[in-house]
Amino acid sequence: MLLTSLFLALTTLPGGAQAGDSFERGVEAYRHGDYAEAVALWRTCLTAELSGKERARVTYNLGNAAWRKRDSLEAVGWYTIALQGDPRNADVWHNLELVRAEAELEPADRGDLRSTWNRLVTSLTPAESRDLVLLALLPLALVLLGEALYGGKLWRTLALGCLALAILLAVPWMGHMLTDDADTVLVVRTSPVGLRSEPRRDLEPVGQLDPGTAVERIDALPGWVRIETSTGLRGWLQEGAIFSLTP
Amino acid sequence: MSETMRGTMNLVCVWLACALLAPGVAAQQEPKVSAQLSTGVVRLGEEVGITIVLENSRNASIVEVPQVTGLEIGKPSGPGVHEFRQYSRGRLQRSVQLTWHVGLRAADVGEYVIPAFVLEVEGRKLSTQPLTLKVVRDIRGEDLGYLEIRTSNTRVIEGQPFTLEIRFGWDSTNRYNYGNLSLPWWDAMPGAIDIESPEATLNPQPFTINDSVEIQAQELEATAARRNFLIKKTILPVRSGELEFPTSFLEFGRYERNRRSVLFNRTEKTESHFVRAEPFTLEVVQLPTEGQPFDFSGAVGRLSVLAVADTRDLVVGDSIKLTVDWMGAGNLEFFEVPDLGLVDDFAGFRVYGSTEEKSFDRRRVTYDLAPLSEEVVAIPPVPLSVFDPEREAYETIASAAIPIRVRPLAQPISLGDEDGERFDRDILDIHTAPLGAETTAGIVPGDRWVLAALLGLPVLWLGLRTGIRRRRGDPGAPLERRRRRARKTLARAIQRDASPSALLAAFDVFLAARTKDPDEAWMGRGLAARVAGASAADLAAADALRERLDRAVYGAGEPVPPAEVRSMAEQLMQGGV
């Protein structure tokens, strides 16, 4: 056990320390107004093993740097990634809504029923939602054991109650299961982007995507990305027009 | 408050607002039903008519005609459909009215209460108000009393209030001491609204109208040996057409103490007379659309206006309370007051709002204003477009301008710009806490763990459940539950009664529960040959104990201590029984 711990410490420490160092130097560069340098340093942090919240902190800072570089759509992308790691962080929400407003996009939380539901379901990180499910399964397991041993109406009612509770508490986890695998990208070009049926520039566009539209990436070729919109429209976009929201 | 909670609160607020506003919106076009008798008092043998009126609906039918013993009520005829149109603030408003007529005849004299007629209106059931009909053998009273109903106008404009004077009286030499009025149109006149007017305070005398409403009438000066009374009522017609006033009656006479009633001080009518006022109609003329201003307020009548400001020397931005009173003979409670925020002359003011007071003789509105600059020198006149029924023309009445002095601010700011100082919105600062401060857990359960737990749990439960039931049967079955409770049942029985016979019975019940036999199965039987799975020594010891219990109950044996019975039960359970 001791040897294993020592081995883990020796193998993980240099990477973590290096990321920490890059992060600090990125902060220093940002303070001096060198946003390109800060972005480069913080991007290297993302290659290291970080916890979800630490990764959210780095991407939040990258969003700030993108905003300072007057690239509001890229800032929207970074803040959106930051929310995946730390969905209840008020700073991230504040900056995201402000940047979306400046980019003339509709708010991330429109305040309507659908937005409120989405925000409620995604207010937990994937790890938190998994913990919640396991926590809900514990009383269910105990009650099922009691039902198997003693039978009777009381145990069956308790089992049904615990099952309903477990299903309710599993909703955030199921939400993550359904959406996290999607390879979402964000259109970050400030003017409308033409969608082509094949990855060729000489073809006439078959559709158009507005800046800030989130679409799903389904294929890629060098310099081109094939996407599918929420309405089911498929086509190819130039790679430089999009920003990947997959952490 | 988090964003999530704010979103949810917004949603709840919208739902609540919808729920609160919906009834108010619906109430504007709510169907309304009423019924009116052609006369409240009738001579025996004469026919009476009931008119049922439904407003604001086209789709209705009478589903229930009331039955009253002694009254022969005919079938309703109709409905007749009447449509009305009126312009209000430049908009044409339409309304519809359905009318049914029902004839009835009384078989005998008396007072009859006619219950409600039930109508089905657009799937809902609505009821009329109950009516009271008095049937008398003869109506004679013209020589002794009188009833006159006079109107202030013979022809009125819709929206123009008019006053009815109900004058009545009787011979003062006969010492009549009661009077009741039967006015079928009272509070039940379609197309008109009763305006609340003050009751008489000078020589007031109480009277009952339609056996339901108590009202104070003014007693006038007696003339020619008659007592005279006066009631005034103001009515506002809300649409054009004819207002019908059916036959009205005054019943007067004498109430006297019943001398046969010794115990109770009862009074009864000893003399009654009736006198009638003939039915009449009043023509209500539509407001002319020609010459109607676009901002017509709906005011009709001869009105005057007076405006007063609470201060006339102030600084830019200070509040002025401008109180405007409209008075006179008109529909003071029913017109729309001017919105000064929309009046061009008030461009130099900011209008913060207004409060209103309504009464039958005055409409008072207090506006909260603030001058925007020191160049304002007067509060402009407050205009109101009114229809004058005497001149039969629209006119605008306006208050007098009120001169004011507005001083400049020491440090001028413009009220036109809400924010004196503007700040840019900006993003929040970066996060600078060093990385690596957060420790990650050694084992983080992944989605596969959760899936495995979700799938494995039911499988494990099913396996365990099936295994247990195959081995021991259903644990929830009554016999199995009795077997599990056997020890507790024995302990309770011993605690309840420790006599030798009770101990023996409790021990037998314990054995029956543990072996899933009926309670009487072990009475007088040996254990050793019949219980499987237990050691022979235990069974022999149990048999010995039961013999001792038998002797204690039926012979002269020593009593067995309860603790010994309990310990034997424990021993048998541990031994496999």
Image: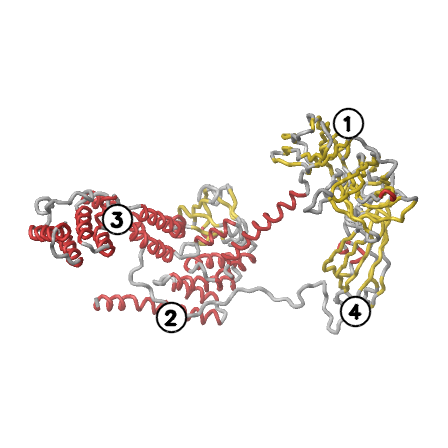
Q: Amino acid at mark 1?
A: Glu
Q: Check whether the beta carbons of the residues at disc 2 and disc 1 lie within 8 A of each other.
A: no
Secondary structure of residue under mark 1: loop
Q: Position of residue B23 (x, y in %)?
A: 63, 45
Is there any visible trace of residue A20 in the rendered image? Answer: yes
Name the image quarter holding residue B410: bottom right
Q: Residue furthest right?
A: B224
Spatial CA distance of label 1 from label 3 is 84 Å
Chain ID at mark 4? B
Secondary structure of residue under mark 4: strand
Q: Residue furthest bottom?
A: B410
Q: Going from the N terminus, do you reach mark 4 or mark 1 first?
A: 1
Is there any visible trace of residue B152 in the rendered image? Answer: no
Chain ID at mark 2? A
Secondary structure of residue under mark 3: helix
Which one is in front in this view, the residue at disc 1 or the one at disc 3?
Answer: 1
Which one is in front in this view, the residue at disc 4 or the one at disc 2?
Answer: 4
Crowd around label 2: few <14 · some 14–19 · many ≥20 (10 Å)? some
Give the residue number, with chain letter if any, for mark 4.
Answer: B314
Give the residue number, with chain letter if any, for mark 1.
Answer: B46
Residue at 31% of width from left, 49% of height from top? A155
Q: Position of residue A154 (x, y in %)?
A: 32, 48
Give the residue number, with chain letter if any, for mark 2.
Answer: A21
Spatial CA distance of label 4 from label 1 is 74 Å
